[in-house]
Each structure stands twice: as structure tokens, then as C-alpha cells.
Amino acid sequence: MDSFYLNEDSENEYDEFTALFKYYKQKVSKPNFNEVIDFKRNADRFAKTLLSVPGDKRNLGLKDVSTWESYQLDNCPGFHFIPDPFTAEGKNKWSRQCVEDYPCDQNETNIGFLSETPWKISNEILQSTPKNHLSRYSKQLKVLKTTPVWKLRWATLGLRYNWNTKEYFQSGCSTFPAEVNDLSCVIASAIGWKNYKAEVAIVNYYHVGTNICPHTDHSEKDLSCPLVSVSFGLPAIFLLGGQTKDTKPSAIMVRSGDVIVMSGPSRLAYHAVPRIIDDDVDCGSADPLDVYLNHTRINLNVRQFQT
Ligand SMILES: O=C(O)CCC(=O)C(=O)O
Ligand SMILES: [Fe+2]
């Protein structure tokens, strides 16, 4: 299955959101990215706010908070885009935890409850791959496809999620990682939300050619608390629309380390990820995590459940 979440409406109905989702998702030819908002490359075109949170957050893999910036969109109040507030070590630490720890710390995944990490890639095989970029890239992909980690699509932290009814199960929850709460609290606090309590998270693992369909996240009891979304690995196009799919969404480039917060009116905005991008991949490293991230995007999507 290429898509997370089935489209809620009939495939044949036309709406602005679905039309753009299909455009960016297409496989026949590469879509044009001219209209994609790129806060990193075109920073001067957008208004930004400087953020600050007291205290040293380097233990969470974050850069000094006084260097963080936040971009907002006039047509979607409450949406914040914080370009990569992580250090290089921080990105490595968090993505490693998402692959090695979270899928097996008694958290449910799409491949069940795992007793050991599905992360067993032989260094030797990866190192013995060809020097030429293209053949190295495809050889590494071939190796990855034979490993259990390749089948990983999602893991839930805290409350388990029923993907059919879109409700959280109230029982059988796993211990929510304290560090994910600490990270989310710093991010929420940077945008002015002082009493955040992260209680559930979905870790999404996307390969090139996979996507997440247009949806809103409305299964939490308190829908006023922000969604905190952190991405690692391959870049992607993120679509952000309005309260219905009739609003034409903005397409936004999201890269490794970038953070999105959806609060206020944007908390219930339609959003989707139609495309994962692997245009500029440097496949020089034979570290299994780097190899995995050259073919995967990880999204840690954190929510507060109760008030
Ligand atoms: O991957 C993303 O950026 C978004 C994921 C998402 O919307 C979700 O998990 O609800
Ligand atoms: Fe979502």
C-alpha cells in the first residue's frame, strides 16, 4: 500500500486539495516545484519571528533556542514552521531512536509488537557496494529492501491508535518517552504554548513513492492543543489547506530537522504529504542509519490527548 489513511471521500469528487495532492503525487512525470514554499532557500520572501525559550536545550539535540526562527502563513493562522532547530548530532540521535528504540519499546507498529529492533543491516554488505553514485544508490536500496526495517510504516507511542475507527484505544498503552515530551514542550513553549503535555505520538516512516492522504487529526479529546511534528531523513512536500478540502492548499518543502506546529485554527486544517523527494542524496556513508535515511523520511507526530 502506497498511502497512509484512505481518502475519506469518493475518489471521483473534485476538490482543490485532492487535485493538488494528485499533482504532487504523480509518478508519470516529475511535478514542477516552482510554487512550493521553501522557507530555507527563499527565507527573504517570508516574514519570520525570532523565538526564545530559557535554558540550555543541547541535551535534547537542539541548537541554542535564541537562533531559532519561525515562519507563519497569512492564510493559515496558528501554523508555525521552524527550520531545522536541531544540531547534526541531534538529528542523528532522534532519527536513530525513531528506528532503533521506538518500534520495540512495547509500542505497537504496523508489523506488530517487536521484541527486537527490526534494524539489522550488515555493514559489510553496505560497504562493499559500488563507488559510482547511481549504482551505489540502487545497490543500497536493494540491500535495504531485504531487511525487516524496510517494512516499518508506523509506530505509536503512548496510546495505541485504531486506524479504522480513527480513535485511540484507552487500554494497553505504552509508556510515553519522557524525552519526546521534553522536546515537544520546548517546541510548544517557543511558540508561546507554556503547558504542553505530550501524551501520544505516531512515528511515520515513508519511502520514496509513499504518501499520506489528505486528512485532519481530530481524534484527540482536546483539539485546542497543538500538533508538534518533527521530520528527519528525506525531504518531502507537505500540503497545508483549510478547514475543508475546498481550500487550495499551500505546498511547503520540509527537510530533515524541520519542525511544524499546528495550533489555533490550523490545528484542524487539512494536510497531507504527497511526495517524498530523493533528488540530492549523498550516499557516501555506509552507516546503516545514513543509508536508511537516504531512502526514508521519518515523521514524529506528537499530540496532547487530554486537556
Ligand atoms: O508526515 C507528516 O509530515 C505528516 C504526518 C501526519 O499528518 C500525521 O501523522 O497525522
Ligand atoms: Fe496529520
Image (tube, rainbow, N blue to C red):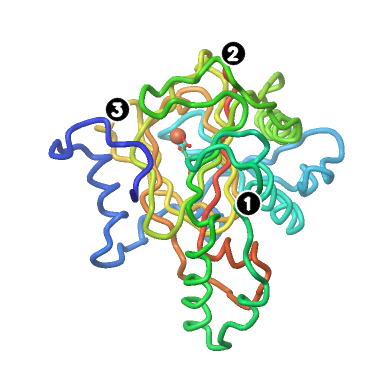
- Residue with the mark numbered 1: 257
- Residue with the mark numbered 2: 306
Q: Classify mark 1: residues with Cα within 10 Å, few (<14), some (14-19) or many (20+).
A: many
Relative to the observer, which residue lies in front, 16 or 75?
16
Q: Secondary structure at mark 1?
A: loop
Q: Is residue 1 left or right of residue 279?
A: left
Q: Secondary structure at mark 2?
A: loop
Q: Earlier in the sequence, mark 1 or mark 3?
A: 3
Work out whether 161 lies above or below 253. Answer: above
Work out whether 64 lies above or below 266. Answer: below
Could you say where residue 100 lies in the image, as x and y percent from the top left? 67, 50
Q: Quadrant of residue 130?
A: bottom right
Q: CA distance from mark 3 to mark 2?
A: 25 Å
Could you say where residue 205 lies in the image, as x and y percent from the top left? 51, 49
Relative to the observer, which residue lies in front, 14 or 37?
14
Q: Quadrant of residue 26?
A: bottom left
Q: Earlier in the sequence, mark 3 or mark 2?
A: 3
Q: CA distance from mark 1 to mark 3?
A: 29 Å
Q: Which mark is residue 244?
A: 3
Q: Secondary structure at mark 3?
A: loop
Q: Which of pointers 1 and 3 indicates the residue nearer the eye?
A: 1
> At 27% across and 30% down in the image, what residue appears?
8
> At 51% across and 49% down in the image, what residue appears?
152
Q: Which of pointers 3 and 2 indicates the residue nearer the eye?
A: 2
